Amino acid sequence: MNNTPYFLTNPKWYKYEERQTSTGIPFQRFELTKHATPEAIASFKQTMIAIGPDSSIDPNNLNRFQQALGYAERQHLFVEKNGLSEESWQREHELMTYAIRSYQLLSDDLVAPNTLIFKPRIAFLYKRFLKEHPTRIDDGDLCHFIVEQDKRMTIQNNKKITLG
């Protein structure tokens, strides 16, 4: 059986690079291209959600991309009237939490990850934050929000595992 995510079946749909963190830890980075089909985008989302529970954040070292996505999540899911059903809200929250985890390895000087996997409102808020803040910011409330949402997701996942 082939376990290759669908988005990796066409090289036009993604970019791949090998990078190192600022501390020298090597990692692989995949990013969708504008040529990605809706099915490839869905596959990328599914892959991010599948690997999300195995990743983590460093609560004392949130980069500007994590801050931007955390800001967008807080604004859209917790402040604005977004019209999402509870199930849709939960799926969006899960995706954003795991995306924030996946961004942990990125350095602040990279070109911002694209927003193809996010709803347009999230993408807009994310891009606006990055435009207004070209470097990470010292915002204790935002960082606390990101850390707390991550903890809640971990607790939720542990309950799923326990309940089987």
Image: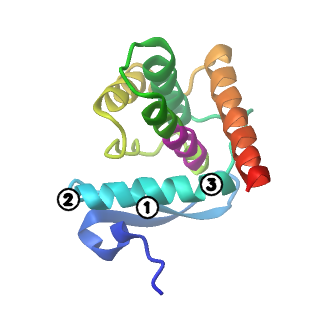
Q: Is residue 19 visible?
A: yes
Give amino acid for label 1.
Phe
Q: Residues within 10 Å of mark 2 (few under 14, many from 20)?
A: few
Q: Which residues are magenta?
A: 94-102
Q: Where does label 2 land, which residue?
A: 35
Q: State the quadrant of the C terminus.
A: bottom right
Give amino acid for label 2.
His
Helix, strand or loop at disc 2? loop
Percent of width and height locating residue 128: 35, 22
Q: Where does label 3 land, which residue?
A: 21
Closest to the observer: 60 or 81?
A: 81
Q: Quadrant of residue 84?
A: top left
Residue at image coords 60%, 52%: 52
Residue 24 inside the magenta-drawn segment: no
Q: CA distance from mark 3 to mark 1?
A: 15 Å
Q: CA distance from mark 3 to mark 2?
A: 28 Å
Percent of width and height locating residue 28: 53, 65
Q: Where does label 1 land, which residue?
A: 30
Give the label, 3 or 1, closer to the camera: 1
Q: Residues within 10 Å of mark 1 (few under 14, many from 20)?
A: some
